[in-house]
Image: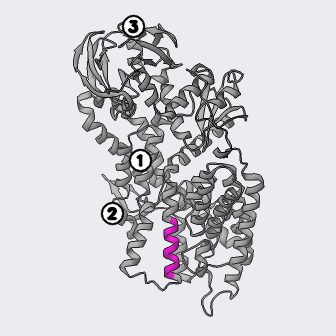
């Protein structure tokens, strides 16, 4: 049996290796092996005999399947999904059988060029792992219909075995796509912990009973104008396969296929805000488990130092502290990578920008505390080609790296417009690192510092006016500042208070906010009955917050569910109010529940009941945040127990 198949060039032009394509999803072969053609003509032909199994609504992507089981994706240009189908005309429809060399589409190359998009045609074997033995690509100038690649199939590959070997998540994605009416019926699709959430043009098309019978589907639900398909723990994998079938770059994790027009300034601002929160939580989700583990390790270390008599000068302490601190210290690098994946920029380049921002010599400039002078209230500690700048603290920071990933995603296409292909591999990273890195360092950092200084001055003023009012306001808003990295200017105030006076009321209020975020996550844990992933995450996040690390609770649970963060912050405001009324003081840096020794008043100083008041405030905060979240902040609409689902049979065929 001959297992070699010839793939024809779909267009006249220059055949290049996928590694040279200016899109990391294709160049890194995320969607599989294949080749690309820089076209000279407008007519697109079928590279093989096969069946049309997918057409993107924006006409920029065509999916074919051969009798031997090969699945091909013809992607017409890069980022051309943004053109709304205008440069493309399709000559086939889903379900058509085509012959190699048959015209299947036309492309207006001039229109693509005028839109400043790359017109490279990609041919990718999307099920390479299952069917492909080897592939030999013939690079260079070629005519449409000439042999561009020779594919050697695995010996066992046939139409039957290729289908059998196909990953179940892909089968599930394809059958769900067909069941909801195909790409033409989908307005948008997102996913949560367990569900695919479709917004459909006609939600009467899906047959609920049939969708439930698809293998890999646990249940369906119709709520909030969404058609929700419950998948369970593999929802992300099915979502990625679904996005690939729709012809959308999976690394972008785009939520909208056909954006509806949003009118009104208020609606646009609301949409932009929730989109930003979605990007923040989406960028943080891959590292939440790591941060929770690091937080608990830090908690263990605090216990050992406070109660186990471990000295902070020992090498043992240094080693354990490094283990716990590493994830937070290098957070800009980690978040740079995940945010780039979320926003579609180059993860390696954005990670390198994060490394640049926490480079030891730059950290030393901030740590020295030496300022040449002050400009608009911001201390100038460096200059760049004579431009006075403020280098702030970037370790532990999140928002500057999300901005960097966003900016990189915007700059990369611009560079590709004018940079010759032969120079892109070296000079694209160089230009991108310089422009994005310096924008963050020279503009974003100082702007954040300027706002932070203003906020810090306001908080300091509040503390002198009314302790109860300041507790209410700071308690309710402090964790919002943390999200945007605006809290750094508050830290020196605390340090100055403790250094000069031996205590800090402000730090006590901040400690309350940590307790509240943990209580919100705890309420989610208690209320969740059927989602083991969320239940485990919310418990670990609550424990982490109890030891002073709020990131897992905020980014993994509370912000992700929106109202949970709000109710937790209201709980913190209530706790802060009581904290201010009782004038609870703090004599150390370690906060939250694990930091209770920091509330022990020094002999002859402060209120002897300070520790008692701390526990009273902590209990009030926990109760307030927990009750508000339990009854108003979280509804268990995203939980489902796979064990409750009956055995499913596959009855939907694409």
Secondary structure predominantly adopted by residues drawn in magenta:
helix
Left or right: residue 451 versus residue 571 is left
Residue 194 position by quadrant? top right
Q: Earlier in the sequence, mark 1 or mark 3?
A: 3
The stretch drawn in magenta includes residue 301: yes
Q: Which residue is mark 1?
A: 337
Write the start and end of the magenta stretch as one range.
295-305
- For the residues bearing labels 3 and 2, Cβ distance under 8 angstroms: no
For marks 1 and 2, give the one nearer the viewer: 1
Label 2 CA crowd tier, 10 Å (few <14, some 14–19, many 20+): few
Left or right: residue 47 versus residue 480 is left
Query: The residue tagged with tag 1: helix, strand or loop?
Result: helix
| Colouring chosen for the image of the structure | one colour
Residue occupying image coordinates x 34% and y 35%: 28
For marks 3 and 2, give the one nearer the viewer: 3
Residue 346, horizontal then vertical, whole percent: 38, 40
Query: The residue tagged with tag 3: helix, strand or loop?
Result: loop
Disc 1 versus disc 3: distance between alpha carbons?
42 Å
Left or right: residue 85 versus residue 7 is right
The quarter of the picture where the N terminus appears is: top left
Residue 188 position by quadrant? top right
Disc 3 versus disc 2: distance between alpha carbons?
61 Å
Residue occupying image coordinates x 64% and y 68%: 461
Label 3 CA crowd tier, 10 Å (few <14, some 14–19, many 20+): some
> Label for residue 99?
3
Q: Earlier in the sequence, mark 3 or mark 2?
A: 3
Q: Which residue is mark 2?
A: 360
Left or right: residue 129 versus residue 278 is left
């Amino acid at each position: 049996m001959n297992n070699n198949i010839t793939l024809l060039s779909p267009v006249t032009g220059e055949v290049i290796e996928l590694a040279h394509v200016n899109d990391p999803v294709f160049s890194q072969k995320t969607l599989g092996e294949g080749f690309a053609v820089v076209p000279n003509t407008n007519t697109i032909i079928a590279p093989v005999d096969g069946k049309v199994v997918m057409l993107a609504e924006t006409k920029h992507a065509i999916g074919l399947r051969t009798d031997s089981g090969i699945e091909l994706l013809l992607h017409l240009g890069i980022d051309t999904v943004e053109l709304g189908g205008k440069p493309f005309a399709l000559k086939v429809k889903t379900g058509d059988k085509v012959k190699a060399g048959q015209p299947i589409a036309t492309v207006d190359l001039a229109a693509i060029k005028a839109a400043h998009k790359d017109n490279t045609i990609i041919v990718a074997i999307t099920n390479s792992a299952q069917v492909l033995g080897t592939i030999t690509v013939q690079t260079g100038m070629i005519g449409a219909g000439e042999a561009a690649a020779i594919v050697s199939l695995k010996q066992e590959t046939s139409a039957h075995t290729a289908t059998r070997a196909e990953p179940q998540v892909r089968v599930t994605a394809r059958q769900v796509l067909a069941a909801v009416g195909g790409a033409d019926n989908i307005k948008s699709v997102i996913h949560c912990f367990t569900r695919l959430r479709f917004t459909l043009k006609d939600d009467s098309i899906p047959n609920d009973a049939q969708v439930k019978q698809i293998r890999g589907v646990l249940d369906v639900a119709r709520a909030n104008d969404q058609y929700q398909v419950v998948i369970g723990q593999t929802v992300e994998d099915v979502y990625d396969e679904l996005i690939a079938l729709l012809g959308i770059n999976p690394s972008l994790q785009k939520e909208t296929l056909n954006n509806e027009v949003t009118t009104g300034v208020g609606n646009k601002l609301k949409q932009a805000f929730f989109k930003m929160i979605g990007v923040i939580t989406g960028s943080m989700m891959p590292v939440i488990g790591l941060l929770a583990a690091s937080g608990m390790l830090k908690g263990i270390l605090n216990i050992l130092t406070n109660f186990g008599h471990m000295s902070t000068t020992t090498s043992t302490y240094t080693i354990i502290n490094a283990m716990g601190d590493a994830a937070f210290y290098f957070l800009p690098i980690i978040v740079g990578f995940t945010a780039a994946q979320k926003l579609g920029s180059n993860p390696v380049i954005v990670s390198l920008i994060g490394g640049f921002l926490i480079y030891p010599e730059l950290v030393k400039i901030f740590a020295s505390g030496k300022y040449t002078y002050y400009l608009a209230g911001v201390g100038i500690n460096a200059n760049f080609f004579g431009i006075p700048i403020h280098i702030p603290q970037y370790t532990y920071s999140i928002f500057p790296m999300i901005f960097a990933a966003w900016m990189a995603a915007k700059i990369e296409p611009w560079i590709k417009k004018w940079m010759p292909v032969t120079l892109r591999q070296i000079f694209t990273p160089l230009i991108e690192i310089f422009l994005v890195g310096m924008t963050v360092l020279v503009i974003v950092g100082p702007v954040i510092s300027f706002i932070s200084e203003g906020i810090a001055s306001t908080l300091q003023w509040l503390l002198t006016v009314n302790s109860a009012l300041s507790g209410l306001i700071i308690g309710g808003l402090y964790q919002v500042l943390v999200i945007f990295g605006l809290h750094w200017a508050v830290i020196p105030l605390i340090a100055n208070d403790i250094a000069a006076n031996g205590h800090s009321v402000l730090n006590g209020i901040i400690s309350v906010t940590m307790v509240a975020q943990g209580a919100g996550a705890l309420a989610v844990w208690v209320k969740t009955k059927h989602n083991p992933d969320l239940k485990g995450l919310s418990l670990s996040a609550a424990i982490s917050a109890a030891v002073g690390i709020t990131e897992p609770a905020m980014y993994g649970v509370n912000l992700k569910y929106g109202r949970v963060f709000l109710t937790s912050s209201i709980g913190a405001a209530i706790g802060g109010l009581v904290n201010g009324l009782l004038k609870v003081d703090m004599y150390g840096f370690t906060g939250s529940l694990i930091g209770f020794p920091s509330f022990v008043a020094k002999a002859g100083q402060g209120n002897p009941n300070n520790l008692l008041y701390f526990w009273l405030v902590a209990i009030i905060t926990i109760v307030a945040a927990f009750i508000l979240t339990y009854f108003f902040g979280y509804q268990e609409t995203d939980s489902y127990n796979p064990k409750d689902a009956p055995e499913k049979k596959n009855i939907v065929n694409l």
